[in-house]
Image (cartoon, grey):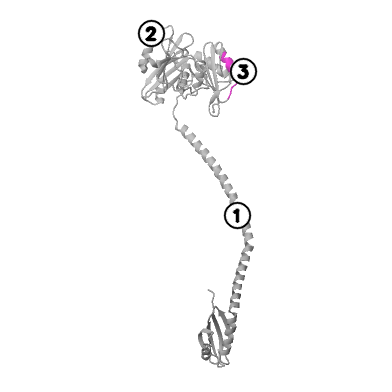
Amino acid sequence: MAIKELIGIYLEKDALHYCCAVRTISSWQMAIPGSAMEPTGVLHGSALAVLREFLQRISPKFGRQIFLSLPRNRFFIRDFQLPPIPIEDALVSVQSMLPVTCHLPLDEIYHDIYFCRLSDGRVNALLIYALRKEILPILELFREIGHEKSLVGLFPISLGIGGWLSLQKCDMPMGLVISQEGSDCELTVYQPAGCVYSTVWQQSLHAGDMSERVESVRAKFHLSADNVYSMDHSEGFFPLPDPLQNKLPWLPSIRQNPGAAALVAGLSGKQLIFLNGEMPRIKVFRFWKLFVPIFLSLAMIFSVWTVQMNHSIEKESSLVSAMKDETQQLQQRIRPLEKTRDALKKAKSLSADIEDFIRLRPHLFSCFNEIAKLVPEGTWFSRTSFQGAELTLQGQSKDALKAMESLRTSALFEQVKLVGSVSRNPAGTEQFGLTIRLKDVETNP
């Protein structure tokens, strides 16, 4: 359940002090609990009557927690020092001693157990119990008006004060004298782990007896005289100093409104005491409490990462599709250009051939005239090809060697060679092939 609102109540015999706060995005701040009410205040009247009036003025709400504190003299507290054992074992040990340590029958009381792990590893336990007939009317009132599910704590006001001292980073250990309604005083001992001792006496107690009781507590918990303070300037004790830096500036002072101390019990992180007839609740580390948040965080991270990756993939896919369409369009536009390019290459090659022919044409004409003039009568050529500076001829003659020798006498020819063999046909003529290399003809590489 998401906690959105906290209400602290300190209920005395003839007054109710309350304080209300709501959670904002970054912190807590004071808030109005009901219509026509201030965020913090005091209602006067008989305890149950004024509590009924207060609860009727606020409507039940999901996400609200109510912490109810009572004066210390409504409770009985027994303290135990246990060896360094697990808290679960300490709980079993204290519960087994209930019939001996409680001076009242168990069926006439509501009880809870407050545990602290001391610096040396030992476990300090406070057995807190009260008469059922005094607590039950309060619980019935919450149930009747519809706030039963919101009530999460019912404890002595000194536990709330301990939570306030812890959040304010006050020096500990310390002893604190707290005046109660009527003529009672409470001496409570606080250590960094929490409240470890509480005793009550009447203010009419003889000064010597009171001093002897305080000294025994100081000796038990190794407190110096400078570490025992008073909430309301009780005679013989130093007044509780204000914190060097107020860590709870949005809350009223617990001296002005003890309801703020009850509210702080929900913020301090200390064990909550709730005398409602149920079994004591203890803080035990559960591995799943660590695993579940980590698992949920990883699941959220992977979910966000997956969504981002899907968006990225969709974006890249659409970009690739667009590029494919653009590529196809470019290919369609390039095809005519490629055809034009191929045509230009062919035209260029043809142009080069024409230029070579034009450049060599005078030589060819001279070459053919020279051949016609030199070869013997009866010699003719049926096939000719020209490449670079070489002319290849295939023909017939009555005397192939004589024709070749006559061509070698020309000044136009650099070289005349017989290609292949000479064959004679039935008509008596010889078939042969020649290659003639022309002089002074530049050839393209």
Residue in the foreground of this view, choosing between 327 and 109: 327
- Residue segment shown in magenta: 50-61
Dot 1: within a 10 Å radius of its alpha carbon, few (fewer than 14), some, or many (20 or more) residues?
Answer: few
Work out whether 231 lies above or below 89.
Answer: above
* Residue at screen point 55% across, 27% down: 24
Task: State the residue in front, 158 or 111.
Answer: 158
Q: Amino acid at mark 2?
A: Asp
Would residue 394 appear left or right of 161 to someone viewing this image? right
In primary-sequence order, the first of circles 1 and 3 is 3
Q: How far separated are the C-alphas under marks 1 and 2? A: 98 Å
> Quick one: 191 or 98, which is closer to the camera?
191
For the residues carrying marks 1 and 2, which lies nearer the camera in this image? 1
Mark 1 residue type: Lys
Per the rendering, the mark at residue 266 is none
Give the mark nearer the N terminus: 1 vs 2. Answer: 2
Mark 2, other Cα within 10 Å: few <14 / some 14–19 / many ≥20: few
Work out whether residue 77 can be spotted.
yes
Q: Residue at x 35, y 15 (%)?
A: 219
Q: Which mark is residue 36?
A: 3
| Residue under the point 49% across and 34% down | 293
- Name the residue tied to disc 1: 324
Q: Secondary structure at mark 3?
A: loop
Indicate which disc, 2 or 3, sits on the residue closer to the N terminus: 3
Q: Which mark is residue 209?
A: 2
- Mainly helix, strand or loop, the magenta region? helix
Q: Amino acid at mark 3?
A: Ala
Name above or below for residue 216 compared with residue 86.
Answer: above
Q: Are marks 2 and 3 in contact (CB under 8 Å)?
A: no
Image coords of residue 427 (percent x, y): 57, 93
Verify whether residue 59 appears in magenta: yes
